[in-house]
Amino acid sequence: MLLRSPHLASEETPPFELKGSLFTLTVLHLFQMDRTAIERHLVEKVKQAPSFFNNTPVVIDLEGMTDSLDGLDFNGLYELLRAHGMVPVGLRNGTPIQQAAARLAGLPALPESRANSGAKKPDKPEPALHSRLVNHPVRSGQQIYAPDGDLIVLGAVSAGAEVIADGNIHIYGVLRGRALAGVRGDAEARIFCQSLEAELVSIAGRYRISEQLDPADRSKAVQIHLTEDRLVIEHLTR
């Protein structure tokens, strides 16, 4: 009997492969390290949308800290976020000492925000270069991303689905899932849909969840944009 070498088998069929992918991360901009205040605010946020924060990946950003950064209790912060259903995945904008302390708590250091990069910040984001056209409904569990441009969906977006674009999002059907436009920081991006029933809409990181939608806007054709850093929903005239 000819036995197959385990070594040859492993070469023919690798045990895993690595692929690039896009995941939506929530950034927790920390302004102070008052654990009681943080927990109280977390409880209020989670009450607004329990399902949204369930197993949500979170990046902790220290750029806006007003308290002293000495002696930050990253273990306590990690446990606090986990206790409320969130999954801390890393730290951003910390000093080398804070990053070392965060690593001990299981929080790797992530690249700094674009605002802190050495490159000159442009007055306006670069215009979208490409558009992606989807000529079928987006089913629950699907995630569709349009890098460097707009996303155009000719059908509906089901609950549990997610559509993401660096530019604008156009949905020629009912929006029941999540729509995130301007995900690379384009505050001029917009979302257009024929019927708003979304779980979440977001532009450049500013978001509104289903429970926060005005009943007068539901099932209406709308455009969504930012005005003075505030998410605005306007009805489309026909």
Image (cartoon, rainbow, N blue to C red):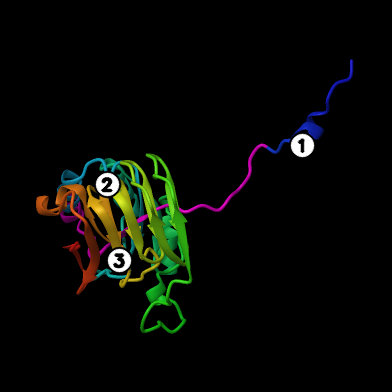
The magenta segment is 15-40
Residue shown at the point (46%, 81%) measured from the top left: 118
The nearer-to-camera label among 2 and 1 is 1
Kindly identify which residue carries mark 1: 12
Q: Earlier in the sequence, mark 2 or mark 3?
A: 2
Q: Which residue is mark 2?
A: 80
Note whether 67 is above or below 134 in the view shown.
below
Instruction: Tell me the distance, in whole angstroms, between the alpha carbons under discs 1 and 3.
Output: 47 Å
Q: Residue at x 83, y 25 (%)?
A: 4
Report the mark closest to the observer, 2 or 3. Answer: 3
> Along the line of sight, which residue is nearer the eye, 203 or 154?
154
Secondary structure under tag 1 reads helix
Between the C-alphas of marks 2 and 3, the distance is: 34 Å
Amino acid type, residue under disc 1 in the picture: Glu
Identify the residue under disc 3.
190
| The magenta stretch spans residue 23 | yes
Amino acid under disc 3:
Arg
For the residue carrying disc 2, how many other residues have a C-alpha within 10 Å: few (<14), some (14-19), or many (20+)? Answer: some
Which element is circle 3 on?
loop
